[in-house]
Amino acid sequence: MSLKTLTRDWEPMSYGFLDASAKRELRRKMLKAVAVPGCQMPYASREVPMARGWGTGGLQVSLTLINPKTCVKVIDQGADDSVNAASIRSFLAKVSGAPTTLDTLKADLIQSRHRIPEEVLREDQVLVLQVPNPEPLRSVQPNMSIARQMHADADYGRMWLQLYEQIVRSGRIMQGASYPSMVNGRHVMTPSPIPRWDVPKLNMAKHLTILSAGREKRIFAVPPFTRVEPLVFDDVPYKVEDHANLTCYRSGVRGLFMNEIPQEDGSSTHEVSDSEYGVKVIRRADGDDTVLGKTWYENGEMSS
Amino acid sequence: MAYVATRGGERAIEQAERLFRAEMGTITPERINEIKAAMPYLVDRVMGEASLYDEDIAALALAQTGGELYEAVLVLRAWRTTQPRLSVAEPIDQDALFTHRRLSAAFKDIPGGQLLGPTLDYSHRLLATQVLTGEAFDPVPVDPAATPAPAHQPSVSAWQAANDLVDLPDDDTTRPDDIPDITREPLLFPSKRAHTLQSLARGETGGVLALGYAAMRGYGQAHPTVNELRLAEAEIVVTHPKGTKFSAGRVKVSQAEVLSKKGEKLELGFAATLGWNEVKVIAAATLDLNSAGAPKGAATEEEFFLYHTEGVESSGFCIHFKLPHYVTFQSSLDAMRDAKARSAQQKETAQ
């Protein structure tokens, strides 16, 4: 018997890039995050061959969950072909051998920046959201260790005050994306910079959502069938972006979240933000046998 | 090509990378050797910030990134993090360092002597422009000293401690494998001492200098006196699986100890890093000196300076703003337009 028969040959890179100890830590921290929904779990957050702030947190989760049979979809701003989504997708495929897809319905694992796809996700799908700033309290408390104590005490008074002040000053809550939301009635989390349109999709969802901030080294989760409630006052209802009556100039899709495209004449036109959904609608109109999934929003209204 | 093309993203990023690499041309082993020989201080700087001591790999990273330092450090860190930790080396005592340069601003002379070593400190910073017109610049050879300085020097603070001027920290008896490792654990506050020193050691030189300088100018309470600055080589002693201790080689290290008076005693700030980088260790030691009791949010507070001098994180986040943000922007526009419409409506009703 020689050493060679007992060990594997040297390889320049582990399967899925991260080494076993990094993956083990991530698995443990993901389990913790699932166990305490919305609570930020610190993790080592290894360097990966991409710059911090470019999806390294989401990437570490995807690299840990991936296997050669996982079908992966990567989007940025709703688009599969956005340059950084293309880069992440090709890296995931290269280091894992996993197949990739653009179709939400065919994906097992969806890594996304700033959007949740428009088609309803299933129990067997995992959504990984890239998070730039995991701390919903940052705007009222930039110091991480004080903010951590505030979460422990469920001390969200300043957060509520900030929202109230916005109503007083501007007549409405001015928060755009990253709308602070209460998870399972205990922890306030940032849903990552998804538009307000997407936050209700997390509430009592069938799928698991893992949110990971690589640069800030925090991971948190929304397990399936967990309450996610945007922070709102009883008499001021939550308001999503006013996109219900917009129509996509390419696909004719109506009542979904849109990208605004400024025109030279000073007006705007719109295209559907979930790019592959738009493509599927066009294909179907052309007579292709394309399957469109049920969407969370129907006729511009969130269907429960 | 559009920023977000319908189906062009993959081709676009591939060609953009080719365009960058085309400028650097072929990378040969000769180029790596030339970088190592011609720019040891640059190699040292990226080795320190990457917390990876390997001159060949550091020079390769510099060659591959065309000297884009943040990229060079990132590529080294990403490589480093996948490597197994085979062994933790023995602690290194100051007295055991092979010291090339060592000075103290606190005393005119110190036991062991002031040792200038290699430095540009007293050089006149003039460009050797003759090189550009075809005349090589040949440095004048060094005249060896009649009696060479001893390779090993005692620590200045040991003398101060013996004279009851300073309280040295207790010996850290943590087992080598139990030393907290910032590359494998998150940084939490109040920070573990090992995490603080490790973070400063791999801090980005410019960032450490900016915040250290802020402290020196007066945004910190303590004015630093350089008690001891050392550029040295350290023997890396590791234990063979059979139990034998052996030297795995030497690495270049820098360390700075700064102090200020606090009541009847002196207070110490300390920093060390891989490679020779004097500016970084003096600035880092100044931050360390000022951190005790610093108010939350001050530049000298540990949480503030450790987060903001982490070069891979700060540079990555800075350049991420180039990524499309049109969804979040759209979301903000929606809130703005609605608020504007409301206030217009209110004015109308009032009239």
Image (cartoon, helix red, strand yellow):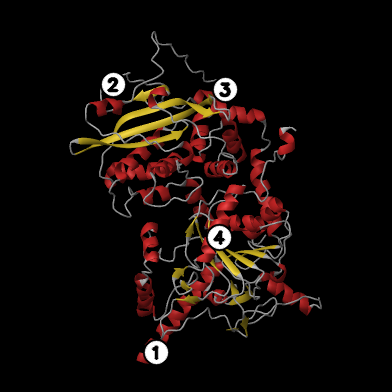
Marks 2 and 3, how far apart at CA: 45 Å
Marks 3/1: CA–CA distance:
78 Å
Discs 3 and 1 share one subunit: yes
Choose between A163 and A275: the one closer to the eye: A163
At which x and y percent is residue A9? 72, 39
**Chain of the residue on which disc 3 is drawn:** B
> Mark 2 or mark 3: which comes first in sequence?
2
Q: Is residue B139 left or right of residue B208?
A: right
Please say if the residues under marks 1 and 4 sit with CB atoms less than 8 Å apart: no
Look at the image and tell me whether residue B66 can be seen.
yes
Q: Residue at x 48, y 43 (%)?
A: B181
Residue A30: give its label.
4
Q: Nearer the viewer, residue B35 or B273?
A: B273
The residue at which mark 1 appears reads as: B348
Q: Chain of mark 1?
A: B
Q: Secondary structure at mark 2?
A: loop
Q: Amino acid at mark 3?
A: Gly
